[in-house]
Image (cartoon, rainbow, N blue to C red):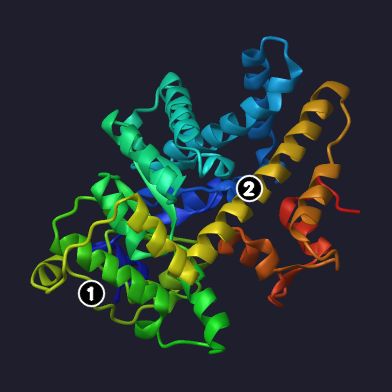
Amino acid sequence: MSHSLLDQLNEVTVTVCDTGDLKSIEKFKPRDATTNPSLITAAAQMAEYADVVDNALRWAEGQAGGDSKKVVPLALDRLAVEFGLRILQIVPGRVSTEVDARLSFDTEKTIEKGRQLIAQYEAAGAARNRVLIKIAATWEGIRAAEVLEKEGIHCNLTLLFGMHQAVACAHANVRLISPFVGRILDWHKKASGKESYLPHEDPGVVSVTAIYNYYKRHGHATEVMGASFRNAGEITELAGCDLLTISPALLDELKSRSEALPRKLDPEAAKKMDIPALAFDEAQFRATHAVDRMASAKLQEGIDGFSKAILALEKLLTERHAALHSGERAGKAAKQFFEVFDLDGDGYITREEWAGAQSVFEALDVNHDGRISPEEMAAGLGAAFVLR
C-alpha cells in the first residue's frame, strides 16, 4: 500500500498544524501546533469553545483585584495561554503563542510580554521548552527575542519575508523562524500580474529554500519552519525543510494523495554550496528592509492584520465579560468582528481586507468565491453568535 504525501512528508520534515481548532489538531496529531491572533479570534467565537473564553475571563477577574478595566487586557493573554495549554495536552511537542502584534516595534514591552506568557504556562505546569513565544520579525522584535533566548525562553519569529530578517534572527540565536511562503507569492502575483507560478518557481518557495540552504551552509542552529501556504505544490517543493506549518485543509489534501514525494531540501547538500556569509547591523537591516518592497509591505500588512484581530477579540471579550454577569447571550461581537475586516463596508470581506491567516479565510469562504459574506461568517463562527 502506498504512503500518502503526508506520510512521506513526515519522514523528512516535522509537520505542524496551523490552527486554533482543537479538533483539527486531534485529527492530524502533529508534533507541534501554531496559533496566531486571527486563529484565536475566530476560534474564540465558536460556540464549542465558549468555556475556554469564559475560563480566561474568570481567571482575569481573579487577577484584576477588582479593577474591571484590567480584566479584558489580562484575558487577552490568558485566552492565548488557555488554548495553548489545551493544545499541549494533544501534541507531544511545542505550541507557539503570539505576543500582541501592537508591541511589534517595542523591544522592552515585547520582552515583558514574553516573560508574562511563559510565567502563565509554567504556573499551569507546562515546561518552558514546550512553548515558543511568537514575535514579529521587526528589528525590535529580533532584539527582544535575543534577550528572551538568553533566559531560556524560546521564540518563533514570524512575519518573515526577507533574507535580512532571517540572518538577523540566526545571529540572535532565535530558536525558530516562520518565513511566509504564501504571502510572498501573493505579493509577487499582484506585482507581476502573473496568475500562477510553477511550484519550483514560486517566489515564496524560492525564498524559503534560500534561507534553509544559507542556515545549513553556515551552521546556524535556528530552525526553519515554512508557513502560510496557498497550495500543496508549495509544500511538496519544500519537503525536507526543518518544519512546515500547514492548515487543516492542506493537511487533508496531502493525506488524500499518494504520489511519490522526493526530498527537495537537504542539509548535506546545502553544506557544499557556495553561499557567502552575511551580517546586518541595525542601520544595514533597516536600509535593506526599506528597499525590499515586498518584505516591507507584507511585514506591515501582517502586523496590521494581527492587530485588527486583537481589536476584534477585545470587543468580543468585553461583551462576553458583560454577558457572564448579566446572563444575556453575547452576539454583537461577531458583527463587530466582521465589520473590523470589511474595510470598504460593502458587506463582504475579501482576501486583501482579511490580512489574517489564510487557513481561516479559506474555512470561512464556504462557496470559495474569494470573499466572506456575513452569512458565511455566522456559519463559521457558530450558531451562538449572530451578525445581523
Q: Is residue 87 left or right of residue 259?
A: right
Query: Based on the displayed image, in which of its 4 quarters is residue 322 positioned?
Result: top right
Horizontal side of 111 relative to 371 (left or right) equals: left
Up/down of 31 relative to 268, above or below: above
Residue 155 in the image: above or below residue 77: below
State whether residue 173 is above or below residue 224: above
What residue is shown with label 1?
263
Question: Percent x, y for residue 250?
Answer: 48, 68
- Of residues 78 and 126, the one drawn nearer to the viewer in this rendering: 78
> Going from the N terminus, do you reach mark 2 or mark 1 first?
1
Q: Residue furthest left?
A: 272
Q: Residues within 10 Å of mark 2 (few under 14, many from 20)?
A: many
Residue flagged by tag 2: what amino acid is it? Answer: Ser
**Which residue is labeled 2 in the image?**
307
Q: Residues within 10 Å of mark 1 (few under 14, many from 20)?
A: some
Q: Quadrant of the N terminus?
A: bottom left
Quarter of the figure with the C terminus: bottom right
Q: CA distance from mark 2 to mark 1?
A: 37 Å
Whether pointer 2 and pointer 1 mark residues with C-beta atoms closer than 8 Å, the reply is no
Q: Secondary structure at mark 1?
A: loop
Position of 94 with respect to 101 (left or right) is: left
